């Protein structure tokens, strides 16, 4: 494990910042680069891809953006008519048949939960609903203690053969906010590939997929400083990867004691995780990187890096609450003689 302060590192500036964003350099942009944007799943969506056919580009762009609204309609706990809301209302009464998409996300969520020994747990919604980040309200200790017995991913029973979901106890609320955007990003990339697109960037807040390179050179992706919106922690040259960042600055308020109350909750305590400011995961697909970024955030730098080092093709950048950066071994630059 490497721990480093913010300094010059192999030509990159390690001076940290919120989500991911693309670092723009002058050059390759032209009429053939098509850009689209939208808002869905409570987050801004940005799409950029290379295509020579204007009509095709318009059609593909609209199809990709529509994916996010489709996933939102299925998986948002804030929509009473969503598939997840119906699941939360009915699954404690018996098995509920769900769509292919929802079952795939629930299976991946369980995989990450098992891998992280419960650090990632979609049943955190059983206490998460007690927080109101817009109003700056948090639950009492009594409310948390009442809800915590229902936070246990093992109480969500998946039957692969029947494609059903059942809850073992009343009051469980699953929340896919820590993984559904990654799934939507992957679906969007699938639409691009099926339409013959080979160079693209698709992002939804802290989740991003890069398709190919930027026509002969890498995409440059910045990870923002968790405490300075206009600064970068690190700039990475990347291609053909997924990148997801979880940060304590995305949804938060300061309580009466001056403590930061944010949306990444510990399944063990029901309270905002302390000790970490942001986690960025780099891997092959956004469904995986989205879930892992939350898991590592909850686990903390030491246990989180230990877990990531066991996984093939996954890297991590963690910024702790002391403004120190921790990176997985594959990201450590070679030492010069």
Image: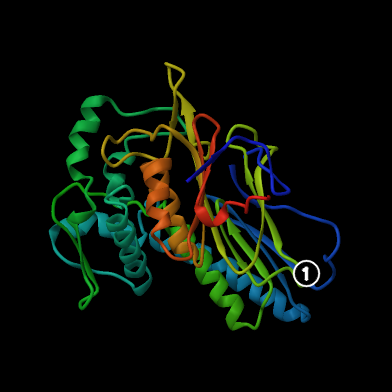
Within 10 Å of the Cα at label 1, are there few (<14), some (14-19), or many (20+) other Cα atoms?
Answer: some
Q: Residue 22 at what x, y percent from top left?
A: 69, 54
At 21% across and 38% down in the image, what residue appears? 147
Q: Nearer the viewer, residue 83 or 127?
A: 127
Q: Nearer the viewer, residue 54 or 275?
A: 275
Above or below 241: residue 40: above
Left or right side of 18 for 71: left
Count of marks overlaid on the render: 1
Q: In which quarter of the image is residue 135?
A: top left
SS class of the residue under badge 1? strand
Q: Which residue lies furthest to the front in this view?
A: 337
Q: Quadrant of residue 109?
A: bottom left
Q: Residue 30 at what x, y percent from top left?
A: 85, 68
Above or below 141: residue 120: below
* Rendered image coloring scheme: rainbow
Above or below 4: residue 219: below
At 38% across and 35% down in the image, what residue appears? 273
Q: Residue 208 at what x, y percent from top left?
A: 57, 59
At 62% across and 52% down in the image, what residue appears? 333
Q: Residue 281 at what x, y percent from top left?
A: 50, 54
User: Is residue 277 at all visible to an observer of this figure?
Assistant: yes
At 46% across and 18% down in the image, what residue appears? 258
Left or right side of 212 for 99: left
Left or right side of 115 for 142: left
User: Is residue 291 at all visible to an observer of this figure?
Assistant: no
Residue at label 1? Answer: 33
Q: Which residue lies furthest to the top in this view?
A: 257
């Amino acid at each position: 494990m490497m721990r480093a302060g913010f300094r010059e590192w192999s030509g990159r500036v390690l001076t940290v910042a919120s989500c991911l964003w693309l670092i723009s350099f002058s050059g390759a942009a032209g009429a053939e680069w098509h850009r689209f944007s939208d808002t869905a799943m409570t987050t801004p969506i940005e799409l950029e891809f290379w295509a020579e056919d204007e009509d095709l580009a318009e059609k593909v762009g609209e199809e990709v953006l529509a994916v996010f609204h489709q996933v939102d309609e299925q998986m948002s706990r804030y929509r009473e008519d969503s598939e997840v809301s119906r699941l939360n209302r009915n699954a404690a009464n018996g098995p509920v048949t769900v769509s292919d998409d929802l079952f795939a996300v629930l299976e991946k969520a369980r995989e990450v939960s098992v891998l992280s020994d419960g650090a990632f747990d979609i049943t955190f919604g059983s206490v998460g609903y007690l927080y109101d980040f817009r109003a700056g309200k948090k639950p009492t200790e009594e409310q948390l203690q009442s809800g915590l017995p229902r936070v246990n991913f093992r109480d969500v029973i998946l039957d692969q053969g029947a494609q059903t979901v059942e809850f073992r106890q009343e009051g469980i609320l699953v929340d896919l906010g820590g993984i559904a955007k990654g799934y939507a990003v992957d679906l969007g990339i699938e639409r691009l590939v099926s339409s013959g697109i080979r160079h693209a960037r698709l992002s939804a807040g802290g989740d991003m997929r890069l398709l190919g390179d930027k026509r002969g050179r890498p995409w440059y992706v910045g990870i923002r400083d968790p405490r300075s919106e206009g600064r970068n922690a690190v700039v990475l040259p990347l291609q053909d990867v997924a990148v997801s960042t979880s940060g304590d600055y995305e949804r938060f308020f300061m309580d009466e004691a001056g403590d930061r109350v944010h949306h990444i909750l510990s399944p063990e305590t029901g309270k905002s995780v302390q000790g970490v400011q942001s986690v960025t995961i780099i891997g092959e697909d956004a469904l995986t990187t989205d879930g892992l970024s939350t898991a590592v955030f909850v686990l903390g730098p030491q246990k989180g890096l230990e877990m990531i080092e066991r996984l093939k093709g996954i890297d991590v950048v963690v910024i702790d609450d002391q403004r120190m950066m921790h990176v997985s071994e594959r990201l450590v630059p070679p030492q010069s003689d």
